[in-house]
Image (tube, grey):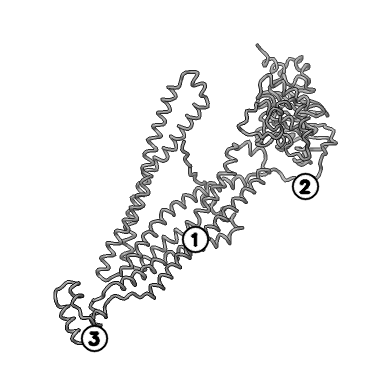
Amino acid sequence: MPRVRNFEKSKDFKGSIIRLFKSLNNYKYLLIFSLILAFTSAILALIAPNKLSNLTDVITEGITINIDEHKINEIITDPNIPDIDKIKLNEIMSMNTSYEDILKNMPESIYNKIKPSINMNKIKTLTIMLGSLYIISALFSYIQSILMTIISNNYAKSLRRKISFKINKLPLSYFDKYETGDILSRVTNDIDTVSQNMNQSISSLVSSITLFIGSIIMMFVTNYIMALTAIVSSLVGFMFMAVLLKKSQKYFIQRQVELGNLNGYIEEIYSSHSVVKAYNATNLSNDEFNKLNKKLYSCNKNSQFLSGLMQPIMGFVGNLGYVVVCVVGAILVMNNIISFGVIVAFMIYVRLFTNPLSQIAQAMTSLQTTAASAERVFELLDEKEMSNEDNLTLSLDKNSINGNIEFKNVKFGYDLDKTIIKNFSANVKSGDKIAIVGPTGAGKTTMVNLLMKFYEINSGDIIIDNKSIKTLKRECIHNLFIMVLQDTWLFEGSIRDNIKFNKENVTDEQIWSALKTVGIDHFIKTLPGGLDYVLTDSDSISVGEKQLLTIARGMIEDAPFLILDEATSNVDTRTEELVSRAMDKLTKGRTSFIIAHRLSTIKNADLILVMKDGNIIEQGNHDELIAKNGFYAELYNSQFQN
């Protein structure tokens, strides 16, 4: 399907552009020099037509016989020409004969005086000067293009570096607020848009404005009649094009809407293709597709037809200017108001006047897109960061930690006026297996996020081995935990690299031992290359196998605390048994926190915390809670009802 690029408008165009240029402060000298080169290149391009006009006049004079009244008076007063030849010239000029007859009967002494003579020295000088102007102009344009490329690429590099550091400082709440695709778009597409458009638009805008204003000035300086002729003829064409653009705009908008409708329908149908086939709805889906396709075809036809007229109209505007300049110029030449070279100069000025208008329009559109993209990047860079922890000096050694955790009257809410965790307290002893259960939205995962210091608690405290997490850096706390989540994460790389992720000095023997412990070593041996096998998105590895690999990664991490967040929710019953056995081995000797919807997986937990509306309403082991016949028993029995 064709892709349509949406040119998003900036919320604050002026503010975004000002901030963009301020952020280019490190490159200001290169940028200024580049813009000066662009300006100078345009000025040289404006000077060149006048020199070409002079060159044309010199050549014209060198190949044209001049017998005007001034030349005749000069001949008559020349003492070197015999009187008899002068008398004969007067007789010839008084006769009503053609130009060719005058030249044929003209005395030789007079013909030698007026015959064509090209001034080669002057032509050589003008040619060298004209060639130098064009070469220097092209050279300046080339250099400024290189400089702008360097500036834009370095600026994009610095933005990516800033965002990379920024993302590591953003709280988890930011990633909850924005979709992953939106964040990735800011990091990739928006920065690329800023870089590319800045490279193409800024210097183009400077040179186009210079050419546009300069060509108008040069035309009026050269001849105001020709200037008015060229400008009026060009503006008539542009007015017609503006009307056409306004008329076509609705078709472009409608095309994007219809394209979105068609893409959405295609995605919906093909993602559920088996259901469509099962219900014999192929004809129905084809009919709907044809309706949407015809609407898109109609919009495409109208929009592409009108947009296709832009180039011919631009050519028509230019050609119309050339024709009018030639006609009016010829009349002025016949009346000795201008020389032939002026016509040549004005034909170039017409092009220098018309082309910048479209370039300025394109540059302004690019600047709008640049401002919108820069705004999105700046919004990310302006996001509130996690609190600075440079003043925290306490730390815990994971190799010598006891493993006790205490929650003391913990309160937390994503918004200050909406508390999710309300006065939560619990004591967890070293080596305990703690299960946290409850309905969706009860605060189970939030508890873990607070424990990992992904969020700052509103009040209360969490104590790890008699040390408040408020006095410990996040990196220190993260180093104490192994996490196995519901969504398995394996990057594109070898099995070995995935297992020893961010760990050094890990031997293959240790990796095979971890794989054997979780019961996936045989599967790895069947893969080509074993530990060297490279995982990609196209691999047909089951969810359960991926989960077992993440558990093996946790064993290599070998931290004193373990968090299992619904680690078996995406696997089938048989695979759940394998994953559960692997998790049991992983939890051995560690203080473990297990969040699970399937209550069958936490029956052997030392302590089960039953949460509802942010509070612990029941706690105890499985048998005790079943005996109470309370909320936990209700949840458990509901999963095993026939």
User: Which amino acid does the dot numbered 3 rest on?
Assistant: Ile
The image quadrant that residue 518 belongs to is top right
Q: Is residue 172 left or right of residue 73?
A: right
Badge number at residue 391: 2
Q: Nearer the viewer, residue 285 or 398?
A: 285
Task: Name the N-terminal-most of marks 1 and 3.
Answer: 3
Label 1, label 3: how far apart the Cα atoms are: 56 Å
Q: Residues within 10 Å of mark 3 (few under 14, many from 20)?
A: some
1 or 3: mark nearer the eye: 3
Outermost residue, left side: 96
Disc 3 target residue: 81
Badge number at residue 300: none
Image point 20% across, 78% down: which residue? Answer: 106
Disc 1 target residue: 141
Q: Is residue 70 visible?
A: no
Does residue 640 lie above or below 183 as drawn?
above
